[in-house]
Image (cartoon, coloured by chain):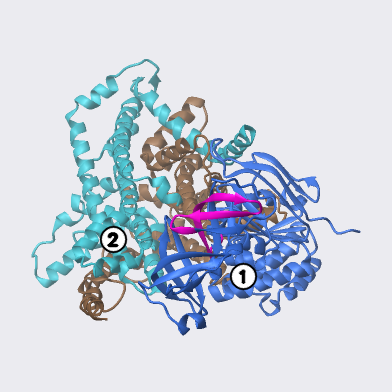
Chain colours: A blue, B brown, C cyan
Amino acid sequence: MARARGDIELAGISKSYDGATYAVDGVNLRIPDGAYCCFLGPSGCGKTTILRMIAGHEDPTSGEILIGGEDVVGLPPVERRTAMMFQSYALFPHLTVRENIAFALRVRGLSKADRLRSADAMVEKVRLTELAGRLPGQLSGGQQQRVALARAAITEPRVLLLDEPLSALDEQLRVQMRQELRRMQRELGITFIHVTHTQLEAVALADLVVVMEKGRIKQAASAREIYSAPQDRYVAEFMGGQNVLAGNVQSLDGATAMITASELPAFEMPLGAGSRVKSGDAIDIAVRRDDVELRRPDGWVAPAGRAALPRRVLAVEYQGNFVKVMLDAVGQDEFVAYVPERQFFAQPFTVGDVVVATWKAEHTRLLV
Amino acid sequence: MTDTALFAAAARPRTRAIAPSRGRRPWTFYALATVFVAYVIALYGPMVCIYILSFQDVKGGLVFPMKGLSLHWFIDLFTQARTGDVKGSFSRSIKLAAMVTVITVVVSFISGLAFRRRFWGDTVIFYLMIGSLVVPGLVLGIGTGLLFTALGWEASWYTSALGAQLSWTLPFGVLVMFAVMSRFDQAWEEAARDLGASPWQTIHMVIVPILAPGLVAVGLFGFTLSYDEFSRTLQTAGSLNTLPLEIWSMTLNVTSPALYALGTVTTIVSFLAIGACLAVIFVMQRRRAGSAPAH
Amino acid sequence: MLPAKLRRNLVSWLYISPLLLVILPFFLLPILVVVVASVFETDGFGGIIPTFTLDNYAGILSSSLTLNLYYSTIKFTFLTWLFSLILGFLIAYFLAFHVRNKLLGIGLFLLCTVPFWTSNVIRMISWIPLLGKEGLINRGLMGVGIVQQPIEALLYSDLAVVIAYVHQLTIFMIVPIFNSMARIDKRVVEAAVDAGASRFDIMRLIIIPLSKSGIALGSIFVIAIVMGDFFVVKVMSGGGSASVVGAFYEDIGVLQYPPAAASAVLLTVVLMAVIGVILRTVNIRKELTQ
């Protein structure tokens, strides 16, 4: 028998609690079977609401949710074959690890022997054998998370929904449990949907990152694409690591454009295929902070194909393997360069130094 | 290092002297500890006196010194007709308290579930409850008595008195349930639903076991409030007395240590109820030692 | 949208219905019966004649006895409230802030609450061997030579009434005040000390405002119980003092239901007004459910 498909399609789903404002506003998305998908956004952006609607803990005001091709709106969670891992886990405090994991089998009426046997297999899978008889209150955060994962996985769901699964853990454990989540996902081979407000988490884990703002999807793509090719200013700024400048198109010449921003001398950059900018358009441009090079001005002239921005050093922050050099703002936009550590200390800058920030024109991205 | 360190050094001894929860004990600790000890002595002292005095022999009086040592007044209590129907009222009170306890626990629990979310009219019901709690008991008693008379029903301890006591124990129980429920994480309920539990399974596999210690506490309230209830029962018990009513009539016409013996007996019953409940709660808490909602 | 909302409300009402099945027939209906009885005439032999009259109220309001009864009841209520509040507040503060071992704190708290679960009547009469003419206190005072004659005013006096009330009711102050104090973050107090606040400032600006809801809740219990009681006044004053409830209990004894009902309605109105004022200062429901 073919495994039940766990691909998900959200077709125009909206959710409003008061009939006037929308927590989720017309979201369309397709998540392939077996993908690791992260919903990313600040708190209140609607990501948890979407998760709860997929899980069946809330009904959309309008729209359809298809799992494996069938509309599941109105069905209880079990019939959807989804399972949820709750924020702070919601482990039953009166049941042992084994009983927590066996809970879903108990409500299905399996005999005690059967359900404990299955639970023990799952306990082993998440490496909690020695702790099977403990109560949740006696476990560490990481162990609790594994119990929660096992408790959700024992229902053999086709989709596992994780609500901020790592937020209750401390920094070190978070990285470790991140790997464990990824391992479990590969092992189970099912779709994971993970809600988080931490960019690093999403970028490290997901095949598909969905960036959200105010109930709408801003961009849904692979982590690399989101990071290297953000669609607009919001995504670029939210993902971080980029300088975003408000500028405009001075002139167009076939596949290249002359771009300027306030205090940024015009430079020529190649346009991607299908670019629809026109001469005179106000646009945002983005450049990765690690693509920016700092030079001393002493008579240096930017060669063709490079943008050059004369600035003054505002602050210097040591970051370990690179140095964050903050420059005077360009108009309203802050401007930062990440200089490799060795390179920085070969010729350190101090606050007040006049520098030229320069980058390859082709590394500039136009944001629509 | 300079200014802040100096400031901190200057502030620390003051903190020690005033903040009661850390550092050296301030003088207020000793003053309040004295108040506390005096309160506890005043709380238990008189009660201990009558327990001691109830063990006098036949010559015993209402005040110290002790005259002899025997169980005379306890035997007197349960055999002599002149002290009233102690045996009957005692068994009626226990039965009534048991009924009140069961109903209070069940109804308070169900009402507590309802009050977790807002619904139409919830405020009205809440204030009805508060009203039922604070209205003078005798007023309610008279009303209930008159109501039964008007309907042509006979008042009795297991009908009108039961209802009158519930009008007092239930609001109490629901208020305790509020406090108990506030520590209940809704996510537990959702998790159960997510794992396929029906509403009924969620209640008996998750909600009831988690809230069990609180439910025992509600039961203890129900039992002792009913077992001691006087003013609501006075006009509603009909022809047969409950124990507090019996004690009331005794205080007016019995002037022997039999009264104290009755006090000792009722206190023993109360202590047995408290002890049993605390033991049950303790065992439950111990079994899930250290467990708490995850946040 | 609407059907789901309607369904949720119906479920809530289903859950609340058992409570209503008790509250309506055993609280609302009896109160209405009393109100109705208070405007009917009496035949003087326990019967009620369904003829509308305000004579019962006129009788109460024109009687100088009523004023005395209310004076006496309000006096006891105020004194009991004051002493139980001071005592309850100090003890709750001691338990919440001074006792540092959590287990010891719970133990001491339970120690205070245990008598609450035992009979009030018994706790009241337990003062007799202490306060009586030949009681322990008089013997002690005479033994030490402070007084020559036993002080008779110890038992069967207003003092005895207040002692018995405070003895019974302080627990109703301790529990809610302790509850709200336990929720105060100890670091807030330490921060205030670091900011230079005096002991008095901390009490006035932090502890009292943050335990307001507990004080309100405790006050409601104490006031409601004392105003609705007649038993303690009757026994502990030796019949020397009267109370509002005691007076209408006498009326019932001689089967004068309508005047008793009128008096009961008046007392309930006064009590509800007092509690209404307290409830205005604090949202009890919010405090309880959060």
Q: Secondary structure at mark 2?
A: loop
Residue type for callout 2? Leu
| Residue B239 image offset from top left, x and y in percent | 47, 39
Q: Would you place residue C106 above or below residue C251 in this image?
A: below
Question: Which residue: 47% across, 74% down?
Answer: A295
Q: Quadrant of residue B257?
A: bottom left
Name the quadrant of the N terminus of chain C. top right
The residue at which mark 2 appears reads as B62
Between residues B82 and A358, which one lies in front from this camera angle?
Answer: A358
CA gap, disc 1 and disc 2: 63 Å
Question: Which residue: 35% across, 49% down?
Answer: C217
Residue type for callout 1? Gln
* Image-based side of B16 in relation to A311, left or right: left
Question: How many other residues sit within 10 Å of disc 1, few (<14), some (14-19) or many (≥20)?
Answer: many
The residue at which mark 1 appears reads as A144
Q: Is residue B76 visible?
A: no
Q: Which stretch appears magenta?
A: A239-265
* Image-based side of A51 in relation to B119, left or right: right
Q: Are marks 1 and 2 on the same chain?
A: no
